[in-house]
Image (tube, rainbow, N blue to C red):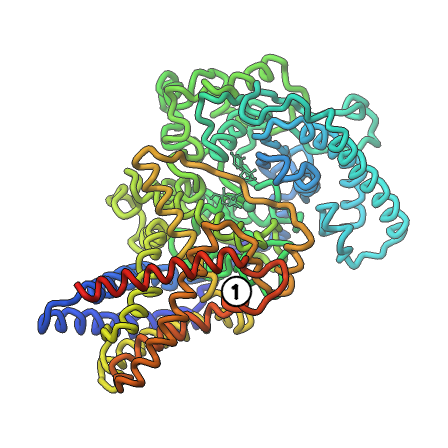
Amino acid sequence: MEAPPYSLCNPMKKTTVINRSYAILQSIAITSMIFYRLSSFHHSTPSFPLLLVFASELILSFLWLLGQAYLWRPCTRKTFPERLMLREKTAEQLPGIDVFVCTADPEKEPPLEVMNTVLSAMAMDYPTEKLSVYVSDDGGCALTLYAMREAREFGRYWLPFCRRFGIKTRCPKLYFSRYDDDFAGRGYEEEKENIKLKYKLLEEHVKKAESSGEILRGINSKNHPPHVEVIQDESDNSTGSNVEKMPRLVYICREKTASAPHHFKAGALNVVLRVSSMISNAPYVLVLDCDMRCNDPSSAKQAMCFHLDPNISPNLAFVQFPQMFHNLSNMDIYDGKLRSVFSVKWPGMDGLQGPMLSGTGFYIKRKALYGDIVREDTDFTLLKQYLGPSNELVKSLNSSNNNNNTDITSRLLEETRLLASCKYENESQWGKQVGFLYNSVIEDYLTGFTLHSKGWKSIFYNPPRAAFLGTATTKLNDTLLQGARWNSGALQVTFSRLCPLVYRLTSRMSVLQRMCYVYLSFQPLYFFPIWCLATVPQLCLLHAIPLYPKASSLWFMVFSYIFTMSQLKHAEEVLSTGDPIRTWWDEQRIWTMKAIISYTIGTMNVVLKCFGLKEANFVPTNKVADDEQTMFYQKGLFNFQASTIVLVPLVTLITLNIFCFIAGTVRTIIDGSFDAMFGQVFISFYVLSVHYPLIDGMVFRKDKGRVPTSVTISSVAISVSVLYFGSLIHMS
Ligand SMILES: O=c1ccn([C@@H]2O[C@H](COP(=O)(O)OP(=O)(O)O[C@H]3O[C@H](CO)[C@@H](O)[C@H](O)[C@H]3O)[C@@H](O)[C@H]2O)c(=O)[nH]1
Ligand SMILES: [Mn+2]
C-alpha cells in the first residue's frame, strides 16, 4: 500500500462553477457592449468624449479578461507534518534551511523589531543545527548589529523556554502582548515572569544604546565597507552538555559606495545568497522582510511537506505563504491585508502553475535561484562567467555542506568580504540570470515570473494558523505610495524585454498562468479608464452630452448588467473569503483611490525614468506605528494627513463630481432629458457615495485627520479650471 502523502490539494469546486459561469455570461455582455459602441460609431462620427469612454471600456474589458485567469481553477491545500516527521524519522534527514532577514532603514524599521523577527526565526521548530539566520543590514547600522548580539544572548533563554512549554508564538514581543498559548504546565507561570523580565531588560539595553547615540555616530547608510560577522558568545566555546544549542546567526552588511548601484532588496538578497553559501549553504532558503515575524514555528516543516514530496519536489521552486499582518483593524479601510491577492488570486494561481513570488514568507530552493546554468556538466569557467570570480562559490554548488561545521575558517570568512563587495557582480550574471533579478523594484514578481517561464512550479500554502505576521500600512499616504512603488515596478517589467505578454512565448508556461502575470504588469493601466470615468461622463452630464444608451432602451440593460454583475461578483468574493459585506464597499473605494493615485504615480515614474528624469527607487515603508495614526485606522476613519500629491487629485475629483452631479441633475430635470442622461447621473452619484469619507473629511470633520482647508481650496480652484476648459472643449 502506498504511504499517505504529506499534503493534499483540493480543487474549490463550488467557487469554480460560480467563477466560470460569471466569466462566460459577463464575456457575452461585454462583447455586446463593444458591438453596441462600434455600431453606434457606424451611424455617426463619435465625439472625443465618447472615444475616451470607449477606450476606457476597452482597457477595462482587457484587464477584466486577464483577471479571469485567477478565477479559473482555484484550490486549497493541507499539509501533514507529522507524517513527514514519521517518515523522515530523524532530524538528521531534514535538509538545512537558511533564513534571510532584510532590513534597510533603522528609523523606519527599528532594530528592536528586526530583533524580534530574528528571534522568532531562530526559535522555529526545526533541528537547530539545520537552521541558520542571516540578517542583511542595508543601513549598515551599528545599532542593528548590537541588537543582533543582544538577541542571540536572549535566545539562550528564549529558545529553551519556547521548546519546553511548547509556546506557539515565538516572537517575544507578540508573545508578551497576547499570551495566547493556553499552556499551564508545571513551572510555567514562574518561568514566564522570569523570561519577561529578561526581555524587558533586553529592550532597555537596546533603547539605551539607541538614545546614547554613541553607537550610531559616523554611520553612513550609502557608503560603508562590507562586514560579515558570525555572532557568537562565550557559551559557544564551552563544551558542557547543558549549554543550549542555538541556530547560527550571521550579520551581513554589504559594501556600498555612492557610485555603484546597489539594486535595493534584490541586491541585498543576492549578497546573502552568496555569503551564506560559504557558511551553511543550505539547500532551502526562507526569505523574510524585517517585519515578518514567524508566528507558527512549524512553517518550515509544513513547507518541507512539499519540498520533500518526491512527486512534487523535482520541479518545485518555492512554497509561498500568504503575507498576514498583526496590526489589522476590523475596519481595514485601506485593504492593508491585500485581501484579493492572498485570498483569491494566489489560491487561483495555485491551481495553475503556482502563485507569484511575494517578497517575503517563501521557502525557495537555492538551486532554482542559481539558474539553468548550474548543472553537473557545466564547465568551470562558464560557471564563473555567470557567478563571478569566486572559486569557492562555484565549488559550493556541488557540496552539500549541511550546516553542521561549527567553525568557519578564516579563509572562508575572508571570501565572504569579496562576495559582499560592490564590484563582485561586475561582469557576472547576478541580477540578470542568477539570483534575484534587478530590472524592477518588484524583484519578487520578476524573479518568480522567470522561474515559472523556465518551467518551475510553485505552491501556495495558507495554513490555519498564520505562519508569518508583518506590519501592514495603516496610513492612507503610506498605502498609496507603497502602491505607487509596486506599480512602477510592474510597469518597468511591462516595458522591458521581460514583458510577460511576449517573453519566452514558447516556454512551458500555460496561457492562464501568463494571463495572471500580464494582468499584474498591465494593472497600472487602470489609471487611464478610472481618470476618464471620474471626469468625462460628469463633464458631459453638465453639458448635456449623452454617452450611454437611454435608460429605457434595451442596450442600457447591457451596461447595467455588466456593472451590477461585477459588483455582485465582488461582493460574493468578499463574503466567500469570510469578510463582512462592508469590506466590499471599502475595497471599491480604496481600489479607485489606488487607480487614481498609485497607478498614476507609478506610471508617471516609469515615464520620467524613460526620459532619464528620475531614478528607480525603493523607499522602505514605515513600520513604526504612532498612536494618533493607529487611532484613526482602528476606528475605520480615513487619515487625510497625507502629502499633497496624494490628496489634491482625490479632493479635486470629488469636488468636480459634486459640482457636476448637482448642476447636471438640475439641468437634466429642467431639460427633461433624464432618460438620456441617467447613466451619467448614476456614475457621479456612485462616485460620490463610494467616496463619501472624502466629503466627510472636507466638510464635516473637525479632527486632525480631516482634509486640510488649504487642500480643499486649491482643489476647488483646480476643479473650477477643469470645468472651464471642459466647456471650451464642448464649444470646439
Ligand atoms: O534597499 C533596500 C530596500 C528595502 N530592503 C528591504 O526590503 C524589505 C521590504 O521593504 P518594505 O519597505 O517593507 O516594502 P513593502 O512594499 O512592504 O514590500 C513588499 O514589496 C516588496 C517589493 O515587491 C517585496 O520585496 C516585499 O517582500 C514585500 O513585502 C524590507 O525588509 C526592507 O528592509 C532592503 O533590504 N534594501
Ligand atoms: Mn513591508
x and y, in percent, of residue 319 in the image: 50, 47
The residue pinned by badge 1 equals 698
Going by the picture, which residue comes out furthest to the top? 411
Q: Which of 300 and 99 is in front in this view?
A: 99
Asked if 230 appears above or below 85 in the picture, the reply is: above
Look at 45% across and 42% down and name the residue there: 444
Location of the C terminus by quadrant is: bottom left
Amino acid found under the numbered disc labelled 1: Met
Asked if 50 appears above or below 470 in the picture, the reply is: below
Q: How many labels does the image show?
A: 1
x and y, in percent, of residue 584 in the image: 48, 70
Q: Which of 661 and 605 is in front in this view?
A: 661
x and y, in percent, of residue 7 in the image: 53, 55
Look at 60% across and 54% down and name the residue there: 325
x and y, in percent, of residue 29 in the image: 26, 74
366 vs 39, left or right, is right
